[in-house]
Image (cartoon, rainbow, N blue to C red):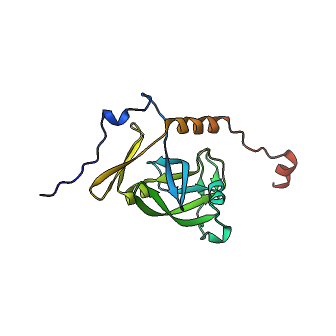
Amino acid sequence: MENQAVMSFSEEDKVGTIQPHDDALMVTLRIGGYNVKRVMVDQGSGAKIMYLNLYNRLGLKPEDLIAYDSSLVSFDGKAVIPRGQIRLPIQAGSKVVEVNFIIVDAFAPYTAIMAKPYLHALGAVSSTLHLKVKYLFGDQIEELVGSQFVARQCLIAAITHQPRLESSASAEMSL
């Protein structure tokens, strides 16, 4: 018989978090060779999103993009036309997974969204209650620990964000 590590969460995994909470799971990942903070782990989404600010800060150019011809719906219900997509290595602890990101030019308080396909490729299990992501690397369980502080900063940024308003002249010209 072979001993296999079992990924599970316990009360001990909550140590260091303020309970109860409804904070998003925000982690730091190494994307394209850089440590990137404010990455949201979204278990309910299938799209891996990178926002244009991060894309530019990583030093990537428009010509690095591959065409992506489907529109997306943002959190505020508006259609968003992606700039394209790009495949980049994502490192979580010791494990590296290649991810196809959809590049979006829209406001978000976070830099990227990692979705179910990423968690599946990593072989990970996430818990928003415990604010952790656990995955196997060899015969060891590694974990990413989320930050409540960062999650709350992002929430405040989202609440206080004032969208750009079109002037009435430019709105009339677009009709």
* Residue sitting farthest toward the right: 169
For image coordinates 50% across by 36% down, the residue present is: 148
Which corner quadrant of the image does residue 66 belong to? bottom right
**Residue 164 shown left or right of residue 135 in the figure:** right
Residue 160 image position (x, y, % from top left): 67, 35
Total residue callouts: 0
For image coordinates 53% across by 61% down, the residue present is: 33
For image coordinates 51% across by 47% down, the residue present is: 40
**Residue 164 shown left or right of residue 79 in the figure:** right
Quadrant (top left, top right, bottom left, bottom right) of the N terminus: bottom left
* Whether residue 41 is situated above or below residue 152 in the rendered picture: below
Q: Nearer the viewer, residue 112 or 150?
A: 150
* Whether residue 121 is situated above or below residue 64 in the rendered picture: above
For image coordinates 58% across by 65% down, the residue present is: 85
* Whether residue 86 is situated above or below residue 165 in the rendered picture: below
**Residue 140 shown left or right of residue 153 in the figure:** left
Which corner quadrant of the image does residue 94 belong to? bottom left
Q: Nearer the viewer, residue 83 or 93?
A: 93
Which corner quadrant of the image does residue 95 belong to? bottom left
